[in-house]
Amino acid sequence: MKGVIAATAAVIVITTAAASAADLPAAPVYKAAPTVSPSGWYVYEDGMYESVALPSNSVGLHNGDPSFVLDEGPTNNFRTRLNGEGVRGGFGYVVPGTGWRMEANGSYVRADGTQDQTGAVTSKGFVDPVFLNGVPTTSAYTCDAVLKCSSAGQLSTSYVSWQAGGKIAYDMQWAGPVSVSPFVALFGGSNRSSQTLSQTFLQTGLGFVDNGTYGASTALTWNDFGGRIGLDAVAPVTNWLSWSFAGSVGLADRMALLTGSDSAFSTGVAPGIFNGASAISTSATTTAIVANLESGFAIKPLPSVTLRAFGGVNFDNRVPGISAPSYTGPNSAPTGTTSAAISFSSETSYYAGAGAIWKF
């Protein structure tokens, strides 16, 4: 599937960003798109490579100090960037005799990835799971110069996003052959990040071996509704090639929901030390700043067809992630616990692709 989309994009790409000054269509809700000539109806479609950034994940096994009093934090911290593909498209109408243009558009992105990491296990202390609800196991495995510890983790992530919306633009000439199209847009959509974490623990020394495992499954879903203002610009390079630029900034009301469950167990000389399980469900709301920049080149092989290649960047200052659970006091009798929750961080994602615009 990725190969087909990439190949299609590569063929179409080499052509759609530079039709004449009024020859680009309005940007889809989340990413900029071309403008079209003022001749009535138009439709466009693009295929894209996506590099999606998500917040870090650091749930699971924790280190502790030798006194069994202080939680010293997670053994793993996965910084997630996924490779995937996307499609976007739309249709619009240029009001005859004016520069006004109306458009409906949408996009869909899917990205997946798996990361492996060796845990930073304490060399003088202990290791135990801290469950999603913030509760540690009452016993822990000791790690020191004699009882040597190691751990490893694997995080699998699946991300899906779709958006739909509409915009109103005004196409006009500016600075000679250059055309600009200021626009306002409304958009809405849904995003989902599903993650599965598996960790293994090994303690050796004094002639014995102990093993522990931890696993967590979490799902983050967030829904957006918001608006943007932006500007598309097209500058002819030759009579068949042009350059385009687009940018926008906006606000999105965001509601996020986190659900998850986890469990752990251990075997060996001291079995049962890791045993336990938990589940959580929580929600949060916020307002996110979203921005986009895109640039590309296009050619026009036919009067009614424009082909283009483009690349761009998306910025979001409130992408939902999962904060690590923690506890205070000794793990055998914590004085306080903090469960995993929804956290927000700034992330920047990238994309590149190709597409076509048809006028009719």
Image (cartoon, rainbow, N blue to C red):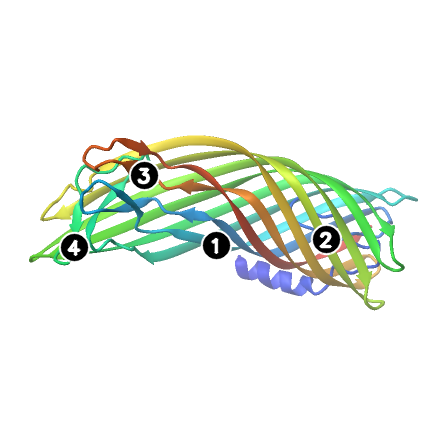
Position of 335 with respect to 177 (left or right) is left
Q: Which residue is mark 4?
A: 144
Nearest to the observer: residue 343 or residue 170: 343
- In front: label 3 or label 2: 3
Nearest to the observer: residue 28 or residue 347: 347
Label 2 to label 4: alpha-carbon separation: 57 Å
Label 4 to label 3: alpha-carbon separation: 23 Å
Q: Which residue is mark 2?
A: 246
Residue 18 figure quarter: bottom right
Kind of residue sitting beneath label 4: Asp
Residue 229 figure quarter: top right
- Tell me the crowding category of disc 2: few under 14, some 14 to 19, or many 20 or more residues within 10 angstroms, Cα based: many
Q: Earlier in the sequence, mark 4 or mark 3?
A: 4
Q: Which residue is mark 3?
A: 326
Contact between marks 4 and 3 (CB within 8 A): the answer is: no
**Residue 274 on image: x %, y %:** 20, 42
Position of 81 with respect to 248 (left or right) is left
Residue 28 seen in this snapshot: no
Nearest to the observer: residue 145 or residue 193: 145
Q: Residue furthest right?
A: 97
Kind of residue sitting beneath label 1: Arg
Q: Which residue is mark 1?
A: 81
Kind of residue sitting beneath label 3: Ser
Where disc 2 sits, the SS reads strand
Where disc 4 sits, the SS reads loop
**Residue 186 on image: x %, y %:** 69, 37
Label 1 to label 4: alpha-carbon separation: 34 Å
